[in-house]
Image (cartoon, grey):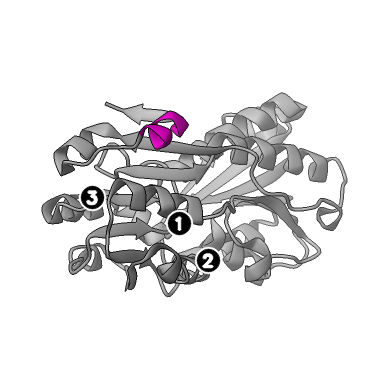
Amino acid sequence: MAFSLVLALVLPAQAAQSMVGIILTGDIPYYQDMNRAFLEQLQREGFSGKFEIVTQTPAPDPVSWSNAARKMVALDVNMIVVYGAPAALAVSRETSSIPIVFAGVSEPRVLGLNGKNITGISSKFQLAGLIKNLKSIKDFSRLGIIYNTMEKDTIVQADEVARMQGQFGFKAVKMSIKSRTDAEKLHGVDALFITTSCTANQCIAGIAKVVRSLNIPACTTVSGGEAAGILMSVYASPQEQGARAAEIAARVLKGARPSSIRVEGPHKIEMTLNLREARELGLRIPLDILSSATKIIK
């Protein structure tokens, strides 16, 4: 597990007054984009040079998340910023006193992220529109749903999509991905939906490779896999998530109680379409879907 001190916002270490801890899971572009936006906005909020930024990048597994949370508590940081539900849950179990600000969490209330020291920005949006679009692009009959039984938020998302079977006319096939090896076992479906699973998104290139070999379309709820071969990604803007988390963090650092700051949902939902992948699959993107895209890969 990587552990580093990021000094982009900091004066020399001796002059640092306090510490802000950041936990972003592994090598996941979606969280990296959030973190860049967070740091940029925190600087605009006037905190340049006032805090030492301590960053940890745990692997996507329960032990690593817990260890990262415990290290932050041991450092007695002034605040912990977390991206994604697994890291947020791990931190919430380790401290009830250090303020926690989260971003990129799709189901904060369902997961119980409502302690007195917790607030943040939700990335929750309705998945029905994503499934409807995928169904319009390809009339699939068996939809593989990639999630992870160790990541509670992905269980909620998988169940939500599975409940759409009757509405959209397909059979849901849930597939728990806990490692890169699991990602190589995909079969028996004619389309794929990928949840916010950290494990799955860490090995998104491997999943995309299997998807291509099966000649089926895949969609996901985070950005970062489009170039690898994901046909469609619909997601809460990572730039908005990071910037709004920084605005919340600034309020807390100025003395506001986390419990006084209401958790709100995203205002900006983005959609990336990979037309190159569509051509490879022999699929045509309907004009109404194409015109709704915020980014197109040609």
Q: Earlier in the sequence, mark 1 or mark 2?
A: 2
The crowd level at tag 2 (other Cα within 10 Å; few <14, some 14-19, many 20+) is: many
Numbered range of the magenta stretch: 287-293
* Residue situated in front as seen by the camera: 104 or 21: 104
In terms of secondary structure, what is the magenta stretch mainly?
helix
Q: Position of residue 58 (x, y in %)?
A: 45, 57
Q: Residue at x 18, y 35 (%)?
A: 279
Mark 3 or mark 2: whose residue is earlier in sequence = 2
Q: Which mark is residue 103?
A: none
Residue under label 3: 208
- Mark 2, residue position: 153
- Do residues under tags 1 and 2 come within 8 Å of each other at their CB atoms? yes
User: Can residue 202 be seen from the camera position used here?
Assistant: yes
Disc 3 residue type (three-letter): Ala
Measuring from the top left, give residue 101's x and y in whole percent.
Answer: 69, 51
Q: In this rendering, would 180 be left or right of 68?
A: left
